[in-house]
Image: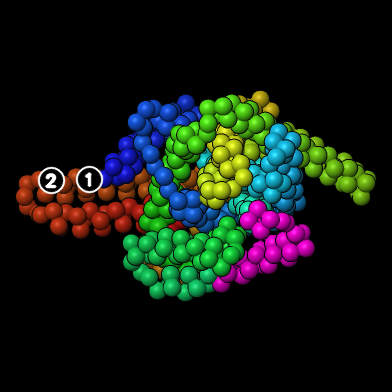
Amino acid sequence: MHVFETLLALLLGATLLSGVARRFGVPYPTLLALGGALVALVPGGPHLNLPPDLILALFVAPVLIDAAYDASLRDLKRNWKPLLSLVLGAVSLTTVAVALAAHALFPEMPWAAAVALGALVAPPDAVAALAVLKAVQPPHRIRTILEGESLLNDATALLIYRLAVGAVAAGGFHVATAVPTFGLVMIGSVVVGWAAAHVNARITRRISDPSSSVIFQFVTCFALWLLAEHLGLSGVVTVVVCGLTIARGNIAAMPARVRLPSFAVWTTATMLLNVLAFTLIGLQLRPILEGLEPEQRMRYLVGALAVLGVVVVIRLVWTTAHHVVGGLFVRLLHGKDEPSPLRGVLVVGWSGMRGIVTLAAAMALPGDFPYRDFIQLTAFVVVVGTLVLQGLTLQPLLRLLKLPKDDIEERETAAGRKAAFKAAYESLDGVEGPVADRLRNDYKEVTRRAADGLDPRDTEMNELRRKALEKARSAILALRSAGTIGDGAYRQVEEELDQLELTTATGDYDGA
């Protein structure tokens, strides 16, 4: 019961903090991590210790597959150069720089342990990045790059981390075996993720009950992560490939009555997991400090702050250098200069928030791992430090740089609406009768609004429908209050009115 009561208290406190964050325009992960840290320092405060493997599966897998489903594969392809630079270059350089810094601060630290530290603090976290980006609303291209990076860079870092931990256990590290292993793991993860998406789609098509479909989606998400880990593959890559394939492959013909509640449940569930994840980050402060001797704390804290500085600076240096070198190549190859988007480069460089993956990887180190306490303290300092330092200043930075606001998604959404409702209107060609005429006029109005970039739901017809449905709800409520109908009949009619409201929200266009 104590664990259950602790979870309830943490969720209540986290919900209140999230509300405060929204009220003041602050990214909620920052306040949650700080709130968890303050709770951890309170004498007799709650302990919530979860196995690191469970942390990754529980908090990372569903957020990744949800983000992969929503990601634009077209935009990822268009920005493959900066993405590859961040996923491979920035992660690798950060790993090396942190390893060198750690070894310089603690010369007796084995190189493999230093590399493991570098790998686990190298990748900006998908959960943190997506949560902060939703709050600060950067331009479309920058958001695409950062979201794409957050989907894939964990794979690079966790593979390096796994090799480094294995090197400590084996007493050595061999590049000749590490590189082929890295390639096989990546290829195997892509294949398994692609195959799982097709198997998932075949089964999903046969599930017509929304509740059963949602449960199946979550079970397969967690099972796929666990299967990948059991096979020695990258859970990150496997889950991301599966999500991208399902979303982009048009292989899962999910009806609207299943899709709408599925999206609602996934939105709520990922928000709940995010809240718990960032609160859990703060709660790890006490067990980390309890594992340190008093004389070690200050020495380790100084080293952890130094690593935090290296992590922040290296990302800025790498993104700027990639931009400058890329501009030089364009100038040499094409003899012309591209417009210099240095302001956007600074935003990308400053968007390096770390999160639950870094902390879980640190907690998963074996008990006898060299400098385990220092690595865990450093992971905590880097995560909370980046969430506070970068998370709180990212929105002011965007305002200071005055990046031009783009309307790419708005324009593309308008084009999609226009095409969809025009096709619906044209489907009535040759159909006669009063019902067809009424529907044709309705679609004509909706199509006109879509072409003008307006919300197609705000038509006069739909406004009358909403008012009519409000009267209908009042009527059945009065019948139930008078005892004329029972609760069972009331709920049945209420559900039918809800369905009418959904199907008429955009002019009888189901699933819009």
- Residue drawn at x 52%, y 34% is 292
- Residue drawn at x 85%, y 43% is 325
- Residue extending farthest to the left is 483
Q: Main secondary structure of the magenta part?
A: helix
- Relative to the observer, which residue lies in front, 307 or 439? 307
Q: Secondary structure at mark 1?
A: helix
Q: Is residue 139 left or right of residue 478?
A: right
Query: Looking at numbered disc 1 in the image, what kind of residue is underneath it?
Result: Lys
Is disc 2 surrounded by few (<14), some (14 to 19) or many (20+) residues within 10 Å? few
Q: Secondary structure at mark 2?
A: helix
- Relative to the observer, which residue lies in front, 195 or 158? 158
Residue 285 in magenta stretch: no
Q: Which residue is mark 1?
A: 471
**Position in image of residue 472 (x %, y %):** 22, 49
Extent of the magenta region: 167-195
Query: Looking at numbered disc 2 in the image, what kind of residue is underneath it?
Result: Ala
- Mark closer to the chain start, 2 or 1: 1
Q: Which residue is mark 2?
A: 478
* Residue 207 visible, this angle: yes
**Position in image of residue 279 (x %, y %):** 44, 38
Is disc 1 surrounded by few (<14), some (14 to 19) or many (20+) residues within 10 Å? few
- Residue 338 numbered mark, or none: none
203 shown above or below 301: below
Q: CA distance from mark 2 to mark 1?
A: 11 Å
Q: Is residue 492 left or right of residue 291?
A: left
